[in-house]
Image: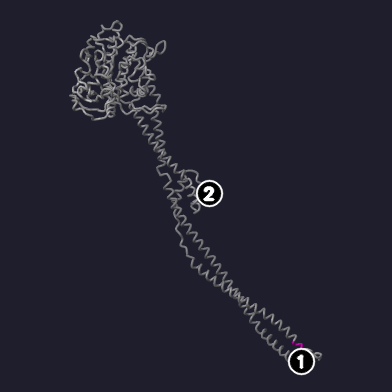
Amino acid sequence: MSFSIKALIIYSHSGEQRVLPFKTHGLNIITGKSKTGKSAIIDIVDYCLGRGSFNVAEGAIRNKSAWFGLHLTKAGDEVFIARDNPGPGATNGSLVYFQRGVIEQYPSMDEISKNTTAGSLKQFATQFAGIVENEHRPVTGTRDPLTANISHALYMCFQKQGTIASQDQLFHRMNEDFLPQSMKDTLPYFLGAVDESHFQLLAELDELKKRLRILDSTEAKRLQVLEVSRSRVLRIITDGKRVGLIPPDYQPVDDSVFDYLTRVAQTPVESPNIVEDFGETIQNLSGEQATIQRKLTDLNQDLRAARSFLSAQTEFTKEATEQNARLKSIGLYKPDSGNGSFCPICDSELKVKLPSVDAINRSLDKVKQQLFAVHSESPYLQAHILEIEQEISRATETLRSVQSELARAVAEDENARVAQNNLVARARFFGRLSNFLESTVPDESTNDSHAEMEELKKLIAAVQTKLNADEVTSRMETFLNLIGQKMTAYSGQLDLEHSGSLLRLDLKKLTIVADTIDGQIPLQRMGSGENWVGYHVLTHLALHWWLRKRNRPVPGFLIFDQPTQAYYPPDIIDGGLEQIEKDSDRTAVQNLFELMVYACEEIDPEFQLIVLDHANLLNDWFQDSIVEEWRGENALIPYTWPTRESLGKE
C-alpha cells in the first residue's frame, strides 16, 4: 500500500501550530464557506511533497504562515515533512525539514531547521510512495527516456476547483507544457501494464547491451589493429620467405595467417655449424700468388732478354759470315806489293791505296775468332732460354694451382659467411616475428569472446521478446477496459448525460469517452458543468479503485476541491441542501456524496478521500465524515495569527 495524510500542520511566525487532522482511510470532508483556505490545501500538500513552486494564492496564508508541515503514514511508518513559506510574491522556498519515525508530537518551530534539500525530499517522497526504479522509453526515439516520480503520481491525486469542473482537462496540471505527454508516458507504469519485472528486464537488457558494446568495442579495436597491421603482415611474410622459413608460394588470405605465423615462430632455430676461418688461408694463398706472379714477371723479363740476346748473336753471325766469305776471296789476290798502290788482281795502279793483304787477313782472322766465339756460346744461351721457359712453365702451373686453391678457399669462405649470415638473419626474423605476434595477434580468449557475443545476442533477443511492446499495449487495453467498466458502474449512481453508456479512458487524448449507439462522445461534447464534475469524480474514483486493487505506487489519497460548485449558488453560507433551488440538483449532490462513500467502502485496501466543499448534508454518514467545518471565524489560518510585517520580520 502507499501512504496517506495523517495531518496538515501550519506554523505561524510567532511559533503557533495549526493542526488539521485526517482519517487515514475513508471519506474526510472539510466543509465551509468561500475564502477560508480550503482550496489552498491541495497546493500546500503538493508543495510539501516536493513540488518546485509554491502556488498558494496571495493573502492571509502567505502573510501569516512561516512553515507548512505534512504528517504522512504508511503501514506504521511515519514521516514529518516541513517546508518554509517563501512569503508574499515568492514562488519557492529553500528550507526543508525531514523527520522519520513515530511522530508523537510535532516539533516546535524552534526545532525546525533545514536538514535536507528539495531534491532529496522529492526523491524520498518518490521512494516512500513505493515508486521503484523505472523508465519509459519512447518507441520513436524522438524524446528522452522518462522516469516516473512522485510528481507524476500526484496527477491522479488532486482535483482542484478549476480542474474538476473542466471539460478539457481531466487530470491535475494538464494545462502545463509537456506534462500531458509525461502523464501518457507514466500512466502504463502506474496502472501496472509495465510492472517491476518489466523494469528488471529493462535493467537486464541494459546490462546485456552494455556487455555486448564492450565486446563489440574490443572486437572493433582488434579488427582495427589487424587492419593497421596488414602491411606489417606482408612485410613479415616477405622477410620469412627471404630467410627460407616461409614457402615462396605462401599467400595470407585471412586471419588464419596469425595461426600460421605462430607455428612459424615455434620453429627451432638451427644450430650453427663450426666453420673454419678461411681468412688466413686466403691471405697466405694470395701472398703466394703474388710471389709467383712476381717471379713469372722476372722470368719473362729474363726470357725476353735471352731471346733478344740470341737474336742479336744470330744477326752478328750472319754479318760476320758474310764478311768472312768476302775476306776469303783474298785467295784470289796477288801478293801484296807492299805499298797498296797497285791492284792485287790486275796490277793496275790505283789512285787510292787499298788495304794490304795482311791487313785483310788479319781482319779475316779476327772475324773467324769472333764467329768461333759466337758459335761456342750459342748452345749455352739456347739451354739458358730453355731453362727459363721450363721454369716459367713450372711457375705458371704452380700459379694455376695456387689460384685454384685461392678460388676454392674464397668460395668456401663466402659459403660459410652466407650460412652464418642466414642464421643471423633467421634469428633476427624470429625476434621481429615474436614482437609482431605479441602486439597484433588476438589473445586466446578471442574465440571465447565471439562465443560470448553470440550468447549475449541470444539473451538480448530473449529479453526483448519478454519486453514485447504489443504485450504492454494489450495489457494496457485490458486494464483500461476494466477501469472503464468500473466507471460505467459508478455512472449508474449518478444522473448524468449518457449515463449507462460504456465509459472508458482515452489515454491518447487524456479524456473520457462514452461509447453510445450514436458513436463516441468525448468529455468535451458532454454538456453542462454537472456532467463534467460527475465524470471527473467517477473517473478518479475508478482509477483509485484500480490502483488500490493492484497495490500500485500512487499515494493512497484523493482530494476533490468543490465538487458541488455546479449546484450551489456563489453566495452559499451554510451548505445545506435546502440552499439548492432545484430538487434535481439536490438529488445530484446527494448522489455524488453517496457515490464517494460507496467508493471509499469498496476500494480496498485503505483509501483516503478528502473533499473540500461548501456542502454540509445532514446525513449521519456525512456528518461523521466531517473533519472540520469552517464557518464563522473558523478557517485554515486563525484570524488571530500575526503577519510577518507585524512582527517586524523581513
**What kind of residue is marked 1?**
Gly
Callout 2: 10 Å neighbours few (<14), some, many (20+)? few
Q: Is residue 504 above or below residue 80?
A: above
Residue 268 image point, x, y percent: 44, 54
**What kind of residue is marked 2?**
Asp
Residue bearing mark 1: 340
Q: Nearer the viewer, residue 133 or 82?
A: 82
SS for dot 1: loop
Q: Nearer the viewer, residue 92 or 591?
A: 92
Quarter holding residue 295 = bottom right
Q: Which residues are magenta?
A: 327-340
Quadrant, the N terminus: top left
The residue sitting at 46% across, 48% down in the picture is: 261
Q: Is residue 236 magenta?
A: no
Residue 400 image point, x, y percent: 57, 69
Residue bearing mark 2: 249
The residue sitting at 50% across, 63% down in the picture is: 413
Residue 599, numbered label = none
Task: Specify the color scheme.
Answer: one colour
